[in-house]
Amino acid sequence: MLDESSKPDSEPATGEIPLVFAAENKPQTRRSIFSRSAIYPHTVRAISAEAASELQAHRRNRSNPLDATLRLLEDFTDHSTDQLYTDSNLVEGPTTAVGKVMFKSLVLLICVAVGFSAVAAIRQLQRDTRLHVRQELASQASRQDDQVKKLKKSVDGLLSQRDQLQKKLDAATSNASPYQKSLDMLALNPVEGSGVEITIDAGDTGGDHQARIATLQSAVHDTDLQQIVNMLWAHHAEAIDVNDVRIGAQSSIRVAGTSILVGTEIVTAPYTIRAIGDASALSQAITPQFFPQRSQLESQGVKVDILTRQNMHMAASSSPLSSSSSEEKAEQEGIEKYSAPGASAH
Amino acid sequence: MVAVIGLIIGILIGVFAQPSIPVELQPYLPIMVVAAFDALVGAARNYFERNFSDRAFIVSIISNVVIAALLVLLGNQMGVGSQLTTAVLVVLGIRIFSNATAIRRFIFRG
């Protein structure tokens, strides 16, 4: 329904809404959608009289009718159709039959496409699109699992092969059977190699042998020898002897009366302790850090000297378990056996 | 009437043809369909208001669909795809309801 107005496209008075033009006042030119008259609410629009009055009252009650935000919301809710439809009233449509058919056909095609797309969209949403993905992932997981099993089997095989090779290596590189190891522990094997020789002797006594022995016997105790031997073991000595008496892991150094016994052998002063091993490491055994008694011995006139030897021979311990005789032992050493007064013969 | 017939034909073709949509188009299809429906409902309202124009309808539906798809694409590129999609759907939904209300008024008031 159209209402007549006498003022087309003019600024309205506040609160007034000029309505749609009558046919005789219809504008001759097309109006842009962005034109001022299109933006204002009082533009060319087909509305009923009562709707117009309602709209007018609503505008009067608003505090700021030109507020941009309110206008935006109003446009959004009130102008929910395309303004092109209103503008199309100002323009003549196609007059030829071909033009009309063409546009109708286009509308038909578009609506067919819309219907088709709507059904396709609904089908796609209803379809379980994840099913294919899940199946693909499941097959991938299965393949990877098989691969893992194969690799695990291969790793197990390599591990067992490694263990076998390790056993062979241990057997080949081990220089002692359990029997041999026992013999080493009991010092029942002869040993040869470089090492150190520690000499505990009296200082300058003016050539008096008795004074020399008396000084040594009073100053040097079994604990001193024990300390030196223990430190040599701690510094990785392979074999030790005291006055040519071989010391094993079970050997004891103890005092009996005025004599010092190594195992059951009596050793007498001066004392010579030999150790086969790393000379630089063994030298540390009599440093003040590991042998604090050295300073006390030196204050009592006892000298503790250490020498490095390149080639030392130590015979096997003379023990009921050993099959070697004393002659064989002397032959193995190849040196004149030391014999101090009071030393026991082997 | 032509639009309604076209819509029905399209639906029937979709039901029987069982189409598969390209993967690239799948995220945008729902919003494009809603935008097309907004244009359709707007066209129906203008039909009842004796304002319907074929050319306006064609321009309206194409522009609605393209702009809605572009908005979603832009949102996805910026990382706000779901929020922008929601905003577009809210706007289109309100427009559809407004037009449906007007159509209902025309139908039942005569």
Image (tube, coloured by chain):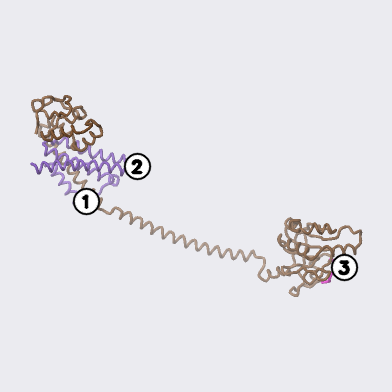
Question: To which residue does mark 3 refer?
Answer: A341
**Of residues A179 and B1, the one drawn nearer to the viewer in this rendering:** B1
- Visible in this render: residue A109? no
Residue furthest toward the bottom?
A320
Residue B1's quadrant in the figure? top left
- Visible in this render: residue A249? yes
The subunit carrying tag 2 is B
Residue B106's quadrant in the figure? top left
Q: Indicate whether residue B49 is drawn in magenta.
A: no
User: Rounded to the nearest whole Å, what is the CA distance between mark 3 and mark 1?
Assistant: 119 Å
**Tag on residue B18?**
1
**Of residues A178 and B103, the one drawn nearer to the viewer in this rendering:** B103
- The magenta stretch is A338-346
Q: Amino acid at mark 2?
A: Gly
Q: Residues within 10 Å of mark 2 (few under 14, many from 20)?
A: few
User: Rounded to the nearest whole Å, what is the CA distance between mark 2 and mark 3?
Assistant: 102 Å
Please tell me whether mark 1 sits on a helix, a strand or a loop.
Answer: loop
**Tag on residue B79?**
2
Q: Quadrant of the C terminus of chain A?
A: bottom right
Label the purple chain with its letter.
B
Q: Which colour is chain A painted?
A: brown
